[in-house]
């Protein structure tokens, strides 16, 4: 139907290349924006373990070396479970709470998109540098916070900016964020498996913020046809269309109407991140041939592959009942909870399959929620709605971070009921 509208305006030959260029651009923006966030979560187990070892044992070999992968670890209990003293949920909180704050404020601030993207780029670069040279949890958290601010501000900025483009850039953006998961978690797992330390690997990721800057300023271009009402670039529109801006009261009123999109999405992400940061590191199979850290990295990659597939599926499958996805994700959480406590299955491959399913559910909820908002919300409210709705998943992830720390500590204090796993 969109192409028919363009044909009637006589601009198909000019517009199609422009649309393709913007689709590629938004895919890259999704990739670059979420990369630092994904890398920090993928490295969480390694960073916390190395910092804990450095605090207690000197000297300690660098992570990534063969000696360190099998070196003794200080347990937080005497139950036999291989638990970090600090849950990876702590990294999640540092990686999401600042994003919640910035997502809450950014939609109400009238700042040029170019300025926001410049800040996003600087924060992303700073996050990789700080964490790379950190040797304490406090400094590590500071770097993770920079990554969180970068990802949060970037998401709300690019989603709001997307209303200037063809509606399918939402799908391209979502697919790019899924790509960030696979490429981020995959590159981290591969490079560390090949012998690079996590800190050296993080330094190599400095190419990511450079790519984001180049993509925004030199690749994408707001649609000139097919969306005549949105054809003015956002930076100029903010300066010239003051009369069409929503008032503060209108924005608050719009938030109530968005709850039907935000609540189901938030529930999916709440259960999803309870699994990721509360239970992943407890799903350890000693007889698999992989170390604990290696298993955690490949869990993250497996999950991100599921996210990529579903976030790229909008062209073929559109889902309206996000509440059903929330119910399925809750079921997934219960299965993982039972496995982490009782070790009911001895198959690592079953866990990999369930983790992939978890990623599919989360990715589908994300892309379908924002697509529905972009298609169902009136044009005047679309920019604000797309930006503020991103607060739903971040808030749910933050709540999951707090709960996951409690779950981690509770399970780590329990004795292992299936000793055959340790044989």
Image (cartoon, grey):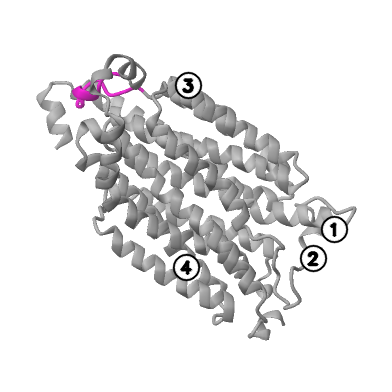
Dot 1 crowding, Cα within 10 Å, few <14, some 14–19, many 20+? few
- 4 and 2 marks in contact (CB < 8 Å): no
Residue under label 4: 353
Q: Which residues are magenta?
A: 221-232
Residue 329 % position (x, y): 40, 65
Local secondary structure at mark 1 = helix
| Relative vertical location of residue 48 with respect to residue 388 in this rendering, above or below | below
- What predominant SS class does the magenta segment belong to? loop
Outermost residue to the right: 59
Residue under label 2: 74
* Quadrant of the rendering where the N terminus is positioned: top left
Earlier sequence position, callout 2 versus callout 3:
2
Earlier sequence position, callout 2 versus callout 1:
1
Earlier sequence position, callout 1 versus callout 4:
1
| Relative vertical location of residue 413 with respect to residue 89 in this rendering, above or below | below
Separation of residues labelled 3 and 1 (CA atoms):
44 Å
Q: Residue at x 72, y 82 (%)?
A: 423
Number of numbered discs visible in the structure rendering: 4
> What mark, if any, has residue 308 been given in the picture?
none
Q: Residue at x 70, y 80 (%)?
A: 422
In this rendering, position of residue 180 left or right of residue 133: left
- 2 and 1 marks in contact (CB < 8 Å): yes
Separation of residues labelled 2 and 1 (CA atoms):
8 Å
Separation of residues labelled 4 and 2 (CA atoms):
31 Å
Dot 2 crowding, Cα within 10 Å, few <14, some 14–19, many 20+? some
> What mark, if any, has residue 115 been given in the picture?
3
């Amino acid at each position: 139907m969109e192409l028919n509208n363009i044909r009637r305006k006589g601009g198909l030959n000019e517009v199609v290349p422009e649309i393709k260029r913007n689709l590629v651009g938004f895919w890259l923006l999704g990739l670059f924006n979420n990369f630092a966030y994904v890398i920090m979560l993928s490295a969480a187990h390694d960073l916390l373990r190395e910092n804990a070892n450095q605090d207690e044992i000197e000297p300690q070999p660098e992570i990534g070396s063969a000696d360190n992968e099998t070196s003794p670890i200080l347990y937080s209990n005497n139950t036999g479970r291989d638990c970090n003293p600090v849950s990876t949920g702590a990294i999640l909180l540092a990686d999401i709470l600042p994003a919640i704050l910035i997502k809450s404020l950014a939609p109400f601030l009238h700042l040029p998109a170019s300025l926001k993207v410049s800040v996003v780029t600087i924060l992303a670069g700073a996050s990789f540098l700080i964490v790379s040279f950190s040797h304490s949890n406090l400094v590590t958290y500071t770097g993770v916070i920079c990554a969180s601010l970068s990802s949060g501000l970037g998401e709300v900025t690019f989603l709001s900016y997307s209303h200037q483009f063809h509606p399918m850039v939402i799908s391209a953006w979502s697919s790019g964020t899924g790509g960030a998961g696979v490429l981020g978690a995959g590159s981290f797992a591969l490079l560390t498996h090949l012998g690079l330390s996590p800190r050296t690997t993080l330094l190599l990721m400095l190419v990511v913020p450079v790519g984001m800057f180049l993509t925004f300023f030199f690749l994408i271009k707001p649609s000139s046809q097919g969306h005549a009402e949105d054809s003015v670039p956002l930076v100029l529109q903010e300066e010239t269309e003051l009369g069409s801006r929503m008032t503060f009261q209108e924005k608050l009123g719009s938030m109530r109407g968005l709850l039907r999109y935000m609540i189901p999405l938030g529930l999916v992400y709440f259960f999803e991140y309870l699994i990721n940061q509360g239970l992943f590191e407890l799903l350890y199979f000693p007889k698999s041939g992989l170390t604990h850290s290696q298993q955690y990295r490949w869990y993250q990659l497996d999950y991100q592959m599921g996210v990529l597939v579903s976030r790229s599926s909008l062209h073929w499958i559109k889902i309206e009942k996000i509440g059903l996805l929330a119910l399925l994700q809750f079921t997934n959480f219960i299965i993982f909870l039972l496995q982490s406590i009782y070790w009911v299955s001895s198959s690592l491959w079953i866990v990999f399959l369930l983790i992939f399913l978890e990623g599919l559910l989360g990715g589908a909820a994300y892309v379908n929620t924002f697509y529905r908002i972009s298609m169902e919300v009136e044009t005047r409210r679309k920019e604000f709605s797309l930006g503020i709705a991103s607060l739903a998943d971040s808030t749910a992830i933050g709540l999951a971070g707090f709960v996951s720390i409690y779950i981690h500590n509770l399970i780590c204090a329990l004795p292992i009921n299936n000793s055959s796993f340790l044989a």
